[in-house]
Image: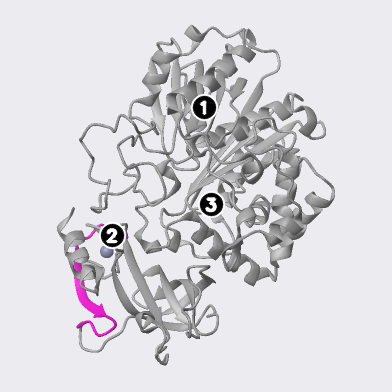
């Protein structure tokens, strides 16, 4: 594994999303790779964005907008007492990265809705990354705190 | 460039059997091909191209839900991606192996000059045909056997490399997002899409190779089938399965030895927009399909030396309906419907019981053995042009088209075939 990729995975394993950036043109490089797909420049990891209380770069949040979404089921049904359902959303972040993330929300989200990356990590079975987003001012769901 | 044509084909029944060896399925389709093309001596074959989506991964752990095939995993350190050098579990069924084309050559008693494997997930089959076509057109070979197969639980079902999909890597998730995007863009309903599997299964009833030709779900059955996500029902999905298909491609110089009714590969179009799903810029259209089909028709027209060929010239087509929504999106990409008009076109096909699109039942009706799918599509179009499609025969087709795609439509290959 390349040094950039292993560094990226060490960070995401701790809940920190470090944006891979080209050292030449500054573009976000996604998925993380050794070289920039725009100019084949080198890649470094930028400051990290954390969520859910994980220390990142101050209180910065990676913000984006929903491109499209659908609802998970049946596993995505809300927990007993929860008012939220679970959706999977293609999100376009301001830094240029697009990815599919989970969103727990009381009503179906819509394309254009603003969201922030609220948590990230490695899936328990090691099959890849997991991402969760939330609406910037979403109130906490008492029955489902894990979704925050 | 020399002209190249299809002079024979052989297919196997599609099944759910996961105990078969990949080479056995390949060999059965090759035997069926030579049984139905007795004029061709196996020693005439100068090159063999095998199509398979497993990436040669045959190690332990390749079977079953939740496993991690290493074949298309890009070395990000996930299970199975690091090249397991331990011995293969002797009890595990064989999903694939490296060196499969020479293995097939040996098993079929052939010693071609060239034998290699093509892997590009669900479009491995047509990409293998393009490789075979190029061998013939360039003069490298006069006769090429192209053979594809897959075992149902192939690791090629999931593109593990695509970390932009997060934990949503199973194809039902990209299909759900395309469905949601398409419905939202054009005001299409779930009921509008429910007629697509109903017609697919109805057509598959007369396809003897189909996975479940006895299945006869109605649009109401589709609508009532189990919801996998908010936008996708069980019967909207094609099923991975075990199956094989082979075609024989010959140059114009030698085709007359094998048949007096060749099916010419008149046009080839290919397009790759990305590998990762998240790079799709517009979820209501499949751009790779539009470009590949446009280029295939353009090439077919120029090869004919006549007026440019258009989609209205196509009498029969096999298109990659991996999920219900793919059919209207591809009809629009082909130009058979205006943007947003694909669902109405699909309904019209359903109400007229048309055989113009996916006469063998497409992927939804027939099953989807990944590495064999593109070859089964091409074999079907050849049989249609030969008027050998029996109960599923389209009306006097002279021009056929195949559209085959991979990885959420991030790449497509199209062929125009002419009698
Ligand atoms: Zn760059």
At mark 3, the secondary structure is: helix
The relative height of residue B297 versus residue B230 in the rendered view (above or below) is above
Residue at image location 53% in from the left, 68% down from the top: A73
Q: Mark 2 points at which residue?
A: A39
The image's mark for residue B401 is: none
What chain letter is assigned to the residue under label 1?
A: B
Q: Are marks 3 and 2 in contact (CB under 8 Å)?
A: no
Q: Quadrant of ligand 1?
A: bottom left
Query: How many circles with numbers are drawn on the protein?
Result: 3
Q: Locate residue A82, reporting x and y percent.
A: 47, 84
Q: Is mark 2 within 8 Å of ligand 1?
A: yes
Q: Name the residue under label 3.
A: B288
Lateral position of residue B176 relative to residue B196, left or right: left
Lateral position of residue B25 relative to residue B350, left or right: left
Q: Can residue B338 be seen in this view?
A: no
Q: Are marks 3 and 2 on the same chain?
A: no
Disc nearest the viewer among 3 and 2: 3
Main secondary structure of the magenta stretch: loop
Q: Which residue lies furthest to the front in this view?
A: A80
What chain letter is assigned to the residue under label 3?
A: B
Task: State the extent of the magenta-drawn residues as a range.
Answer: A36-55
What chain letter is assigned to the residue under label 2?
A: A
At mark 2, the secondary structure is: loop
Seen from the viewer's position, the closer of residues A83 and A138 is A83
Q: Name the residue under label 1.
A: B133
Q: Please identify the quarter of the rendering in which residue A104 is found.
A: bottom left
Q: Please identify the quarter of the rendering in which residue B207 is found.
A: top right
Residue at image location 45% in from the left, 46% down from the top: B157
Q: Is residue B70 visible?
A: yes
């Amino acid at each position: 594994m390349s040094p950039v990729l292993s560094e990226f995975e060490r960070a995401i394993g701790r809940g920190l999303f470090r944006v891979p950036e080209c050292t030449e043109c500054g573009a976000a490089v996604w998925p993380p790779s050794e070289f920039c797909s725009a100019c084949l420049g080198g890649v470094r990891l930028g400051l990290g964005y954390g969520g859910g209380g994980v220390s990142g770069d101050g209180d910065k949040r990676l913000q984006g907008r929903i491109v499209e979404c659908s609802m998970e089921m049946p596993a995505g049904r809300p927990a007993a007492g929860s008012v939220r359902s679970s959706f999977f959303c293609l999100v376009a972040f301001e830094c240029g990265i697009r990815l599919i993330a989970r969103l727990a929300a009381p009503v179906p989200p819509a394309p254009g809705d603003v969201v922030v990356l609220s948590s990230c990590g490695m899936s328990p079975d090691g099959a890849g990354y997991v991402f969760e987003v939330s609406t910037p001012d979403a109130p906490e769901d008492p029955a489902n705190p894990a979704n925050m | 460039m020399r002209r190249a044509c299809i002079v024979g084909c052989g297919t196997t029944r599609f099944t759910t059997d996961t105990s078969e060896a990949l080479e056995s399925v390949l060999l059965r389709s090759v035997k069926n091909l030579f049984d139905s093309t007795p004029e061709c001596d196996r020693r005439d074959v100068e090159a063999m191209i095998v199509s398979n989506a497993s990436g040669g991964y045959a190690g332990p752990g390749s079977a079953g839900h939740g496993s991690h095939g290493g074949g298309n995993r890009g070395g990000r350190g996930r299970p199975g991606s690091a090249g397991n050098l331990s011995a293969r579990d002797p009890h595990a069924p064989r999903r694939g192996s490296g060196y499969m084309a020479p293995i097939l050559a040996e098993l079929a008693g052939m010693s071609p000059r060239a034998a290699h494997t093509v892997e590009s997930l669900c479009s491995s089959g047509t990409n293998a045909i393009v490789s075979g076509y190029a061998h013939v057109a360039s003069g490298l070979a006069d006769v090429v056997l192209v053979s594809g197969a897959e075992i149902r639980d192939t690791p090629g079902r999931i593109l593990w490399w695509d970390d932009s999909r997060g934990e949503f890597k199973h194809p039902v998730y990209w299909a759900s997002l395309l469905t949601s995007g398409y419905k939202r863009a054009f005001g299409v309903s779930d009921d509008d899409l429910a007629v697509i599997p109903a017609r697919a299964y109805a057509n598959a009833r007369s396809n003897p190779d189909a996975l479940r030709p006895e299945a006869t779900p109605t649009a109401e059955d589709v609508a009532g089938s189990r919801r996998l996500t908010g936008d996708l029902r069980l019967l909207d999905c094609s099923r991975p399965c075990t199956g094989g298909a082979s075609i024989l491609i010959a140059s114009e110089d030698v085709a007359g030895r094998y048949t007096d009714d060749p099916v010419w590969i008149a046009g080839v179009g290919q397009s790759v927009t990305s590998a990762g799903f998240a790079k799709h810029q517009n979820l209501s259209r499949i751009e790779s399909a539009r470009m590949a089909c446009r280029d295939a028709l353009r090439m077919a027209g120029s090869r004919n030396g006549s007026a440019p060929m258009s989609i209205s010239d196509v009498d029969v087509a096999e298109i990659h309906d991996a999920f219900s929504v793919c059919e209207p999106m591809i009809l629009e990409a082909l130009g058979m419907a205006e943007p947003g008009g694909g669902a109405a076109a699909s309904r019209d096909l359903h109400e007229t019981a048309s055989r113009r699109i996916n006469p063998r039942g497409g992927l939804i009706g027939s099953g989807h053995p990944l590495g064999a799918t593109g070859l089964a599509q091409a074999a079907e179009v050849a049989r249609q042009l030969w008027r050998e499609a029996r109960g599923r025969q389209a009306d006097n087709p002279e021009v056929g088209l195949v559209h085959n795609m991979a990885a959420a439509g991030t790449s497509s290959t199209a062929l125009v075939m002419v009698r």
